[in-house]
């Protein structure tokens, strides 16, 4: 839709800044509640970090987010996303190469994981079902908390008291299990896992998740929680993780189609210059091309840092909020490489994998982790901690074209690589000079396990943190809009006192991953924000 379509005789109840998945989820639920909604997107395509774009003639890839796990079945069902084209395709069990033809497998099927772990430690295989039960009991608690609006424990008004009491009552049966959450919030992934397992290769299977998208190693305090954040997906149809037919952009295209059906207007190519504030209330937004849109409610799907520091302006914000948002940690070390190729990596262990029938109906491991042990993960972090990219990064290679024929020409493939660490800034260096050297490092790492893959590559798009920042406006390229650390979770995300999707400016809200429960393509921040917006609208009516 063009700007002309929304400037002639139209008025809106709510304006949403940014058509990423959370913004679109928020728009859908506000429209369901009877609000007239306008979504303004900076780029020429909706989707934010969940987009599918061409990387070479005939090849399309999930450019940023690359696997389906966290998008909640409730949102899929209530917004009828399957009717709008959303289709989840299965991926194989996760396989991690260990050198030579050896490998370890991690599966939703506990018995299969046990059998693989038993090759390295009989004790670890025997204890795994108990560990899985323990971890999932903790995850089930957090899954319920995902849908909660954080309560500010320092406020003393009646509404906060009622909300806090209600929160405690709803979760009154947690009991001593809460100590498990505290452990994961404070312990390192390594220390947490070492209480259960003996073998570093088994521990690395789980500790790997603690490093995804986070500037931390498995021995960093607090990294245990990130393991749980990555296993909380409950989507239906592919068990744990899966691919989206047509790439991750199909999620946001389905959300946009659902929103338009509800009367939501979506305008692309409309970057926001300013959120205008009068008398302490947000009244309108101004685009960089000079259009002004007014509404009683304005919701930002942009990063909280961008909203507070760039769009609202310091003069409208309390000094304490400014101090905290400036200190909100977004330093990223994640990278992404999207590859068009003749064939996917031919791993040394591939023949053995097939011979042993490890992957069942799959002939190829579509989902891999390259990080054979704890020390490998920690060394990758050590390089970044001292200001440089990892000499041997951890890497997640996935091959969606094994199940999705829509992304590449017949017989060809797309491979997505995600990994770390590649710091946003380099100590004593610059990405303009080092990007090609890092590209070589990534391919060298893959070649250690799949010799000859370089020769099959047609095109490779490498995105380091500054690229991610420039394209999708994530400060310092952080895929979660900010670190998932104890001081940046729940009632302290993104700043204390304003974790309830509201801001110090009346009528201005945040619906993106800067808010609880954080990053990943879940849609829950968008859902929760819409609920709080409608709560305030109903209160004004009464």
Image: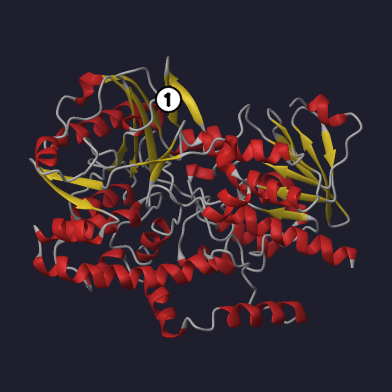
Question: Is 329 situated above or below 426?
Answer: below
Q: Is residue 191 visible?
A: no
Judged left or right of residue 233, residue 95 is left
Number of marks present in the image shown: 1
Q: Residue furthest right?
A: 9
* Residue 467: % across, % down: 47, 33
* Residue 417: % across, % down: 33, 36
Judged left or right of residue 348, residue 378 is right
Q: Quadrant of residue 280?
A: bottom right
Question: Is 221 situated above or below 333?
Answer: below
Residue nearest the observer in this picture, 15 or 87: 87
Residue at the image position 36 percent from the left and 62 percent from the top: 223
Residue that carries the numbered disc 1 in the rendered image: 406
* Residue 301: % across, % down: 64, 47
Q: Quadrant of residue 440?
A: top left
Residue at the image position 54 percent from the left and 42 percent from the top: 474
Q: Is residue 211 visible?
A: yes
């Amino acid at each position: 839709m063009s700007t002309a379509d929304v400037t002639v005789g139209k008025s809106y109840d709510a304006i949403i800044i940014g058509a990423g998945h959370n913004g679109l989820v928020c728009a859908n639920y506000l429209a369901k509640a009877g609000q007239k909604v306008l979504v303004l997107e900076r780029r020429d395509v909706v989707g934010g970090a969940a987009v599918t774009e061409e990387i070479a003639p005939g090849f399309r890839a999930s450019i940023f987010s690359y696997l389906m796990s966290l998008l909640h079945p409730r949102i899929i069902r209530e917004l009828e996303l399957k009717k709008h084209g959303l289709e989840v395709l299965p991926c194989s069990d996760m396989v991690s190469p260990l050198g030579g033809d050896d490998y370890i497998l991690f599966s939703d099927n506990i018995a299969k994981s046990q059998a693989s772990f038993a090759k390295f430690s009989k004790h670890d295989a025997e204890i795994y079902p108990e560990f899985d039960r323990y971890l999932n009991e903790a995850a089930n608690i957090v899954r319920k908390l995902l849908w909660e609006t954080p309560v500010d424990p320092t406020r003393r008004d009646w509404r906060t008291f009622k909300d806090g009491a209600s929160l405690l009552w709803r979760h009154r049966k947690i009991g001593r299990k809460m100590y498990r959450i505290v452990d994961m919030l404070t312990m390192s992934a390594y220390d947490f896992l070492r209480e259960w397992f003996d073998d570093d290769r088994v521990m690395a299977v789980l500790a790997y998740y603690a490093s995804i998208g986070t500037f931390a190693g498995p021995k960093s305090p607090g990294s245990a929680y990130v393991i749980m954040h990555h296993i909380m997906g409950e989507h239906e149809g592919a068990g744990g993780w899966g691919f989206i037919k047509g790439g991750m952009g199909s999620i946001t295209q389905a959300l946009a189609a659902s929103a338009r059906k509800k009367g939501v207007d979506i305008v692309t190519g409309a970057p926001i210059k300013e959120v205008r504030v009068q008398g302490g209330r947000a009244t309108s937004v101004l685009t960089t091309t000079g259009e002004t849109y007014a509404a009683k409610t304005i919701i930002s799907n942009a990063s909280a840092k961008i909203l507070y520091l760039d769009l609202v302006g310091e003069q409208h914000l309390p000094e304490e909020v400014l101090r905290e948002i400036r200190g909100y940690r977004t330093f990223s070390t994640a990278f992404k490489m999207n590859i068009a190729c003749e064939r996917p990596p031919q791993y040394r262990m591939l023949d053995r994998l097939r011979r042993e029938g490890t992957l069942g109906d799959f002939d190829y491991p579509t989902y891999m982790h390259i990080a054979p042990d704890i020390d490998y993960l920690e060394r990758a972090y050590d390089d970044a901690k001292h200001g440089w990219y990892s000499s041997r990064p951890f890497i997640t290679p996935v091959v969606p074209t094994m199940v999705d024929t829509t992304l590449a020409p017949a017989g060809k493939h797309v491979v997505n690589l995600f990994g770390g660490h590649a710091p946003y800034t380099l100590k004593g260096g610059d990405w303009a000079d080092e990007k090609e050297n890092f590209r070589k490092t990534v391919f060298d790492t893959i070649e250690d396990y799949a010799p000859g893959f370089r020769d099959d590559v047609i095109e490779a798009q490498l995105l380091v943190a500054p690229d991610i920042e420039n394209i999708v406006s994530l400060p310092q390229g952080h895929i979660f809009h900010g670190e998932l650390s104890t001081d940046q979770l729940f009632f302290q995300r993104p700043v204390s006192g304003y974790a309830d999707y509201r801001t110090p400016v009346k009528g201005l809200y945040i619906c993106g991953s800067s808010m609880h429960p954080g990053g990943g393509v879940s849609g829950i921040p968008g859902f929760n924000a819409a609920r709080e917006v409608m709560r305030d609208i109903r209160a004004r009516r009464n």
